[in-house]
Image (cartoon, helix red, strand yellow):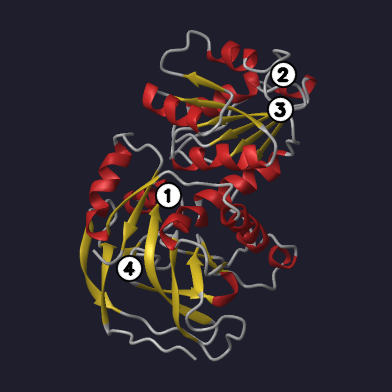
Amino acid sequence: MTTFEIPSEQWAAVVEKTGGPVVYKKIPVQKPGPDEVLINVKYSGVCHTDLHAMKGDWPLPTKMPLVGGHEGAGVVVAKGSLVEDIEIGDYAGIKWLNGSCLHCTFCRQADEPLCPHALLSGYTVDGSFQQYAIAKANHVARIPKDVDLEAVAPVLCAGITVYKGLKESGARPGQYVAIVGAGGGLGSMAIQYARAMGLHVIGIDGGDEKGQSVRSLGACAYVDFTKSPDLVKEVKEATPDGLGPHAVLLLAVSEKPFQQATEYVRSRGTVVCIGLPANAYLKAPVFDTVIRMINIKGSYVGNRQDTQEAIDFFQRGLIKVPFKTVGLSQLQEVYELMEAGKIVGRYVVDTSR
């Protein structure tokens, strides 16, 4: 069996108080419990959720002090006595769902993200913005050895989340899906998963740079909300029959797009809410929703099966994540770019620097 020398201390990006900033400092390396593994995190994607965790603007208490991050890809270097199906040296990923009880009604029905006792990486437990991170063995992503850890990191949340949302939409091959926030980290992957699933994509976002990115990834149309005189009309006209997309994936970080979606989705279409803008609400006219039989639903993160399916798409070369890698010590700068809305694609942090 492969063995690794595990240090007693490591570099980590720590939120010491709600509101931040992130402090790059040394902290102890933890030991895994009986049902846990210790992963030497090589790379971790940076998600908008990590910014919410630092700011504390969601109605869910965060652990403080907190090591954020939930897109960590690395190598298993230690495991607990009860762990049998993972070996030292295997590639593994730390996801948003760090652990669940496995025996409640949700866990028994493969809805473990809804478990009332769920542990959330980088939110209720320390996550992947550190060199060595703990996770429940049952829930770590199994990553094949031929997969690039740097490139796959964003798939562990962004990829799984949008793939799950597309499945929840019920859209079938040949149909149209509008992706709101198509130029961002989740959106760039949603376009690719949708195309790999046989769907036509209408990308909605703001700015020429995001438009170029969306088109380069294969969207059949791009609607720029900063320039469109009538966004609802333009989205409908992007479908051949002018009736609008069969589904809408809402990845936006502001409230307004959530209010618009039911206006342009076609009758009997599905609006899937994924983005989580702070303090936002959904609003739709009851009459229109009823007579057009519109379905509005939320989609959270994927379960263990969704995870492996999403990674399989990536392994087969169907998903290429547009990302930029910086050192873990630069995480605060990434958050500042995120708050300013200046990120196209995804940022990944290298824990070695």
Q: Mark 4: give few (<14), some (14-19) or many (20+) Cα within 10 Å.
A: many
From the viewer's side, name the closer residue of 101 and 130: 130
- Quarter of the image for the C terminus: give it: bottom left
Give the secondary structure at mark 3. Answer: loop
Q: Which mark is residue 246?
A: 3
Q: Quadrant of residue 23?
A: bottom left
**Residue drawn where x is 46% and y is 19% of the image:** 224
Give the secondary structure at mark 1. Answer: helix
- Give the mark nearest the N terminus, 4 or 1: 1
Q: Position of residue 125 (x, y in %)?
A: 43, 68
Instruction: Work out how far the residue at label 1 is from the one at label 3, CA to CA, in angstroms.
Output: 28 Å
Q: Mark 2: give few (<14), some (14-19) or many (20+) Cα within 10 Å.
A: few
Q: Quadrant of residue 9?
A: bottom left
The residue pinned by badge 4 equals: 130
The residue pinned by badge 2 equals: 288
Give the secondary structure at mark 4. Answer: loop
The residue pinned by badge 1 equals: 49
Instruction: Work out how far the residue at label 4 is from the one at label 1, CA to CA, in angstroms.
Output: 17 Å
**Residue drawn where x is 51% and y is 77% of the image:** 90
Badge 1 amino acid:
Thr
- Give the mark nearest the N terminus, 1 or 3: 1
- Give the mark nearest the N terminus, 4 or 2: 4
Answer whether labels 4 and 1 touch (C-beta < 8 Å). Answer: no
